[in-house]
Amino acid sequence: MTTQSKSSLLADHVDMRPVAVDTDETAPDRNTMVRLNPDHPGFRDRAYRDRRNRIAQIALGYRTGETIPDAPYTPLEHHVWRTIWKALVPAQQAHACADYLKAVERLELDSDRIPQLREVSEKVRVISGFRLEPVAGLVEPRVFLESLANGVFLCTQYIRHHSTPLYTPEPDVVHEIVGHGVTLACGHLAELNRLFGKAVQRTSSAEALDRLSRVYWFTIEFGVLREAGKLKAYGTGLLSSAGELEAMHKAELRELDLEAVSGHEYDPTHYQPVLFCAPSFEGMFQTLREFLVRW
Ligand SMILES: [Fe+2]
């Protein structure tokens, strides 16, 4: 049996680099589910890899509707959260759109320790009806996007390795909570996520799914807009990274033409050289809403 067929290589909504979750029950060590690439910052850290496996097991054992079990974060990992938070607060104050800043206040996230998905999911559910569910690693775009139609956001639960607090090669709990969790606590953005899910349910061809995924990428993940003449972020990939928030000002800005967006290729491994800018939050919402309803 080849390595490829022994595991399900999961591709993500953020980052297409593979993280393997080995579900082969005959594998010699069934605790080794998460396989990291040799260039992953945590590759040589046995304790980190063990924890990643334990967290993956939580997700693999999770059934919809159950309370999400708490992840076993260490003091060092809570310190990573604090470090990120310290860099993010001023960056968000300067570069996040007003609707995001209101939503972040509404969620009252703890800046001292990594919030558990269980707590964030409950707060988001009360506000927009969306709930978070844990996944072991990266999921197929169709699975991820279709779940949005049912008000479910599939979340990773691990945090990046402590040696690189401001960098992660894969989406982690910081991106999920600070990016998606917060935006799902904003009514308009939650509605757009739901409409994406419904549009994907009506999509059968792989080519059309690719086009929709690109629209998701350049809006929900990397969307920017103008607010009182200033460039602001509403995309989760930007809002969850101080580096991305600074770098977005160097991107080439194009008008938010969703036909053009759907055909625009991207590379998830670098800062985005091209971003699509809406004239306002309301303009972004109406344009995207109409596009998704018509799809
Ligand atoms: Fe994301």
Image (cartoon, rainbow, N blue to C red):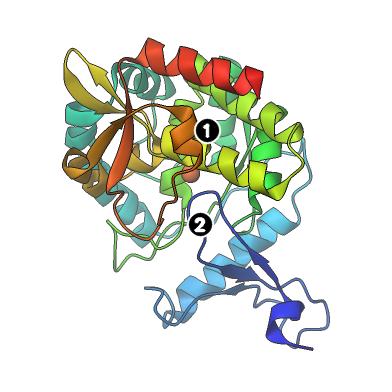
User: Label 1: which residue?
Assistant: 120
Relative to residue 101, is residue 68 drawn left or right?
Answer: right
Q: Quadrant of the N terminus?
A: bottom right
Relative to residue 293, is residue 228 drawn left or right?
Answer: left
Q: Is residue 229 visible?
A: yes
Distance, label 2 to label 1, CA atoms, is 15 Å
Residue 216 x, y percent position in the rendering: 51, 37
- Asked if residue 123 is positioned above or below residue 19 in the image, the reply reads above
Residue drawn at (55%, 33%), measured in percent from left and top? 119
User: Which of 40/42 is in front?
Assistant: 40
Find residue 246 and report its image quarter.
top left
User: Which of 62/199 is in front?
Assistant: 199
Residue drawn at (31%, 55%), measured in percent from left and top? 80
**What's the mark number on residue 158?**
2
Question: Local crowd at mark 1 within 10 Å, few (<14), some, or many (≥20)?
Answer: some
User: Which of 281/87 is in front?
Assistant: 281
Relative to residue 290, is residue 285 drawn left or right?
Answer: left
The amino acid sitting under disc 1 is Val
